[in-house]
Image: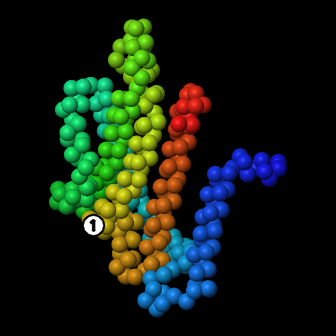
């Protein structure tokens, strides 16, 4: 296979990976061509030192212990937000009564910074896993709910009327027209929810936990362990990228029925 064809088929991956490698090389070489001031040198690190710290933390089990706690809070909170946000967004978009009843509360809760709920959650549930799960849920549920609701409201009314003219009930309208046409909005909401869920994990573990990657980062920063801070940041970044790519793959599968023009929207 010709190099030009390989590049054309994998352009996004090659350019993205190449740019990351270039940034890492420049970062690693900074101490070689620039003498950092003593104050800055104390808080500066390089990719090789971060990798060495990651390997050491991996060997002694520190990452495994903290990652497990963070993963449980993240997955449980995000899963709960999907269970609540997706159906609620669908029914709010289809029911004017529920829309009028719930929209003021959804709007107010979405506009409120999630961190203000953390002290109450810690008081009610302690510094255990449940307070973190609920702060993750509070951050992730609204992007998914609101995007789903907007997707339902933007469904073509003509399609709905056509399906109804063939005798379809509300459930069949939802399954045949509403849900498939709302997929792009739901996927966009899910991508936003992933980012909010990770932020919720970090915030919850910064202020209300004695375990987890967020706690590891906060503890390392307090002790001026910059390498360990970047290890935690890198893990969260890698998790975000992996989950976002997984959601993109899901979108490609769910949107396989759509016309090419619609897929590129």
Q: Residue 212: x percent and y percent? A: 37, 65
Residue 100 locus on image (x, y percent): 20, 31
Seen in the image, is 261 located left or right of residue 129? Answer: right
Residue 224 visible in rendering: yes
Any part of residue 130 in sight: no
Q: Is residue 142 left or right of residue 124?
A: right
Q: Which residue is depicted at the point 34% across and 17% down? A: 170
Q: Residues within 10 Å of mark 1 (few under 14, many from 20)?
A: some
Q: Residue at x 27, y 25 (%)?
A: 95
Q: Quick one: which residue is furthest to the top in this view?
A: 166
Assign a secondary structure to mark 1.
Answer: helix
Residue 179 against residue 220 in the figure, above or below: above
236 is higher (above) or lower (below) than 156: below
The foreground one among 94 and 70 is 94
Horizontal and vertical percent for residue 47? 56, 74
Residue for badge 1:
207
Q: Residue at x 53, y 43 (%)?
A: 248
Name which residue lies at 47% across and 72% down.
230
Residue farthest toward the right in the current orientation of the protein: 2
Vertical arrangement, residue 53 with respect to residue 113, above or below: below
Residue 112 in percent (x, y) is at 23, 52
Q: Nearer the viewer, residue 249 or 163?
A: 163
Quadrant location of residue 258? top right
Colour scheme in use: rainbow
Residue 156, placed above or below residue 227: above
Count the numbered circles shown.
1
In this rendered view, identify the residue nearer to me: 40 or 197: 40
């Amino acid at each position: 296979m010709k190099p030009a064809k390989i590049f054309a088929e994998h352009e996004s991956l090659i350019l993205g990976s190449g740019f990351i490698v270039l940034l890492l090389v420049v970062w690693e070489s900074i101490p070689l061509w620039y003498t950092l001031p003593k104050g800055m040198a104390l808080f500066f690190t390089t990719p090789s030192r971060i990798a060495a710290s990651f390997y050491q933390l991996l060997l002694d089990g520190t990452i495994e212990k903290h990652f497990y706690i963070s993963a449980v809070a993240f997955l449980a909170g995000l899963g709960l937000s999907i269970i609540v946000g997706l159906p609620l967004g669908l029914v709010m978009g289809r029911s004017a009564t529920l829309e009028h009843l719930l929209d003021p509360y959804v709007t107010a809760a979405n506009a409120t910074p999630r961190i203000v709920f953390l002290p109450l959650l810690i008081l009610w549930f302690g510094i255990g896993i449940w307070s973190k799960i609920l702060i993750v849920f509070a951050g992730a549920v609204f992007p998914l709910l609101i995007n789903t609701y907007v997707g339902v409201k933007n469904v073509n009314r003509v399609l709905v009327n056509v399906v109804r003219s063939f005798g379809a009930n509300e459930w069949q309208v939802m399954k045949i027209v509403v849900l498939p046409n709302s997929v792009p909005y739901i996927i966009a909401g899910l991508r936003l929810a992933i980012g909010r869920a990770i932020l919720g994990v970090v915030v919850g573990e910064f202020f209300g936990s004695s375990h987890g990657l967020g706690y590891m980062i906060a503890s390392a920063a307090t002790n001026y362990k910059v390498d360990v801070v970047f290890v935690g940041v890198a893990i969260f970044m890698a998790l975000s990228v992996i989950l976002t790519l997984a959601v993109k793959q899901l979108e490609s599968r769910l949107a396989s029925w759509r016309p090419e023009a619609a897929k590129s929207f």
